[in-house]
Image (tube, helix red, strand yellow):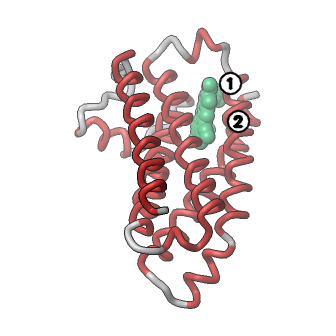
Amino acid sequence: MAPYHIVLVHFPLGLWMTATLFIVLRAFSDGALAKTIDRALVPLLSVALVFGLLAFAIGLLVWPWETIASTPLGRNHVLTASWTVACWAILLWVRWRRGETVWDGMSRWIMAGLALLGSALLGITGTLGGHLVGIYSDVSAGLRLLGWEVYTTFYVPNMTLVALLVIAVLLLGFGAWSRIKAR
Ligand code: HEM
């Protein structure tokens, strides 16, 4: 399955990086070009998500779970891949459900911020994947400066997951409260 994973990951990589450019352009510009490009965003993000999920699913079949989960490098690759897919799925959902209103007011910067976060996660996922096959990049030197040693650091103890869950619930509550207030 390894060759399939390696071929497949190039689709979400290319499509999500393109989507980042589109979103950042639209966040900064209300011009005709940015608006035209924005109309392609939902189809682009949908195709990217399908390929992202396929790459993810095939990734799970490359090595036995015991093998990929036995090192911080492998676990972080799976973890950042999950966050990447989740982040881009949220962007798709928000743009699809809220339409062009996502570019009103502060939301345009939230869109740009999420897109940059999604790209950063994607870059780190790819970097860690590269290390799994013995191809290194300078991104890992950057991560080392932040205190993340790609072969040894594994940062997600249970309490972090609990904190993430609490933040997610708070954000949902905040969203529901804002909606009620807006009525
Ligand atoms: C969207 C999600 C993912 C992306 C973007 C991604 C990206 C990558 C990249 C760029 C490589 C290096 C390929 C190369 O340079 O030749 C790689 C390798 C690898 N990935 Fe992923 N990956 C994803 C999800 C996963 C998942 C969920 C798993 C497993 C649970 C996984 C397991 C692996 C393994 C085992 C390798 C090494 C392949 C080999 O031995 O040839 N990946 N990945």
Circles 2 and 1: CB atoms closer than 8 Å: no
Residue at the image position 65 percent from the left and 50 percent from the top? 12
Mark 2 = which residue?
Answer: 5
Q: Is residue 83 above or below residue 65?
A: below
Residue at the image position 68 percent from the left and 64 percent from the top? 42
Would you say the beta carbon of the disc 2 residue lies within 8 angstroms of ligand 1? Answer: yes
Question: Considering depth in this image, is 69 or 109 the residue closer to the camera?
Answer: 109
Q: CA distance from mark 2 to mark 1?
A: 9 Å
Q: Secondary structure at mark 1?
A: helix
Would you say the beta carbon of the disc 1 residue lies within 8 angstroms of ligand 1? Answer: yes
Q: In the picture, residue 162 is in which quadrant? A: top left
**Quarter in which the N terminus is drawn:** top right
Left-right relation of 153 to 46:
left
Mark 1 = which residue?
Answer: 60
Q: Residue furthest bottom?
A: 32
Q: Give the amino acid at mark 2.
A: His
Question: Considering depth in this image, is 128 or 136 the residue closer to the camera?
Answer: 128
Q: Secondary structure at mark 2?
A: helix
Q: Is residue 7 above or below residue 108?
A: above
Q: Is residue 6 above or below residue 118?
A: above
Residue at the image position 31 percent from the left and 28 percent from the top? 149
Q: Residues within 10 Å of mark 1 (few under 14, many from 20)?
A: some
Ligand 1 visible in quadrant = top right
